[in-house]
Image (cartoon, grey):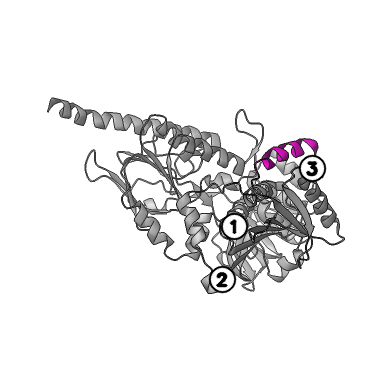
Amino acid sequence: MLDADLKTQLAAYLEKLQQPIELVASLDDSDAARELDGLLADIASLSPKISRTTGDDARKPSFLIRRAGTDIEVGFAAVPLGHEFTSLVLALLQVGGHPVKIDEALAEQVRALDGAASNGQLAFETYMSLHCQSCPDTVQALNAMSVLNPRIKHVAIDGALFQAEVEAKEILSVPTIYMNGTEFDAGRLSIEQIIAKLDNGAAARAAEALKDTAPFDVLIVGGGPSGAAAAIYAARKGIRTGIITERFGGQVLDTMAIENFPSVEYTEGPKLAASLEAHVRQYGVEIITAQRAKALHPAAREGGLVGVELDSGATLQAKTVILSPGARWRQTGVPGESEHRNKGVTYCPHCDGPLFKGKKVAVIGGGNSGVEAAIDLAGIVEHVTLLEFDGKLRADDVLQRKLKSLPNATVHVNAQTTEMRGDGSKLQSLHFTDRSSGETRAVDLAGVFVQIGLLPNTEWLKGAVELSPRGEIVIDDRGHTSVPGVFAAGDATTEPFKQIVVAMGAGSTAALSAFDFLIRHSAPAESEAKAA
């Protein structure tokens, strides 16, 4: 099942097991069950601390990883390879006693969850796809919580393997999380975000904990590539550096393949994000996660402190601020889009594509992202229709030729999307106007993948710094904004090239500019102090 190299690597990890674990398998006579049986046999052969036993779960094939003699366990209704192999390895180690690597205060919050409103138990089910790069974060967060608190149970379910369940629940995006049989949330979730949904007082306590935070020399808003690079460059100068971020990695977490990062021939977004976070933590940067910036308060006087107000109610202060809030998928804004988001309307073909196997879908957008999405989807779905507003596709020629060669793909240019219709629970059709003829057309389908670019996350900055007509933060070649002491970098700025390597360079530039600002504005005060 596992090749020799992978077995060698896994065996090295399994040496970290501190307590015996059992693999409790519930199997049937399907090909997937035979594949899972082979995987579990390989794992059990790699450590004397692992044993196998038979279970009788209603979902087959599935298995539990259980700490022997306890009720600490993690479940998979899947053959967890692909993006979920890391989730499997972490589950084996954590159930086997290897520490869950999260902040101790956060771990205590998890242990305190008692499930009092749910008969003492919080039973989570995460419907995921092995092709989804967003799913492992949610799976790993809930797995870790179930190890820390036995009252929490979790099973990760491969939607492609249990398609009947997915269709019965009308799940059209992954990850989708259920708690005690009721839909809990959809999308990538961190432990902090899950706790915030379970514990109404978590946000208030987080705000209270931040109230007495001393001012930073540099405070960075955003944990994407530009924010991470800024943090590294600032911290290396020996100045007090902090990052506020909802999720470390930003858009990179939603990026499948990265093949244009110099010196790295190929990597994937989540791997790069994890490496960036590890590098930032190496320098002792204070990372404040699961927090959203609400407002920027420029310094009231020259040399004063800049304030960043958070949704939680806390306000952090700093001598300089670097804005790196990134961007998000742009929406079409047509009727029916928001009503059917995650009910047929989606923005991630890699994550959600497998849920539309054998169905008809559409892609809106004729740039590289849109055409690549259509090509990928054509290998899964019955038929894909691509709509482009312009009179021609804007993707690279090689991608256009590939798309046009596919027998189950149709392209409409000069197509203005006008409406997405459904019954409220799932999408049923897409309507568009041919801008050349004025003719209105409709396409019956199950899913629409919107790929029309990005929108900067700058609404909260209106009136605080100068923004372009597109909502981008206006910067000069050194990352200065219109406000002294406030700098910016990344996809939310007027930098024209929205690329990872460009964002990192811009973040580094902003950090060096902030350091230069600190030197120039602290020098007079130091001179006066010496004279006194």
Q: Residue at x 56, y 58 (%)?
A: 332
Tell me the residue that label 1 is attached to: 142
* Relative height, residue 51 to residue 12 (above, below): below
Label 1 amino acid? Answer: Leu
Main SS, magenta residues: helix
Between marks 1 and 2, how big is the CA–CA gap?
17 Å
Q: Residue at x 48, y 44 (%)?
A: 223
**Which stretch is magenta?**
1-17
Residue 120: mark: 2
Quarter of the image where one finds residue 55: bottom right
Q: Secondary structure at mark 3?
A: loop
State whether residue 253 appears in this view: yes
Q: How many marks?
A: 3
Q: Secondary structure at mark 1?
A: helix
Q: Position of residue 207 (x, y in %)?
A: 37, 56
Tell me the residue that label 3 is attached to: 2
In this view of the protein, which residue sits in the foreground, 11 or 88? 11
Label 3 amino acid? Answer: Leu
Q: Position of residue 62 (x, y in %)?
A: 76, 59
In this picture, residue 528 sits left or right of residue 476: left
From this viewpoint, which residue is outermost toward the left? Answer: 532
* Relative height, residue 100 to residue 159 (above, below): above
Crowdedness near tag 1: few (<14), some (14–19) or many (≥20) residues, C-alpha within 10 Å: many
Label 2 amino acid? Answer: Gly
Q: Residue at x 56, y 73 (%)?
A: 118
Between marks 2 and 3, how big is the CA–CA gap?
39 Å
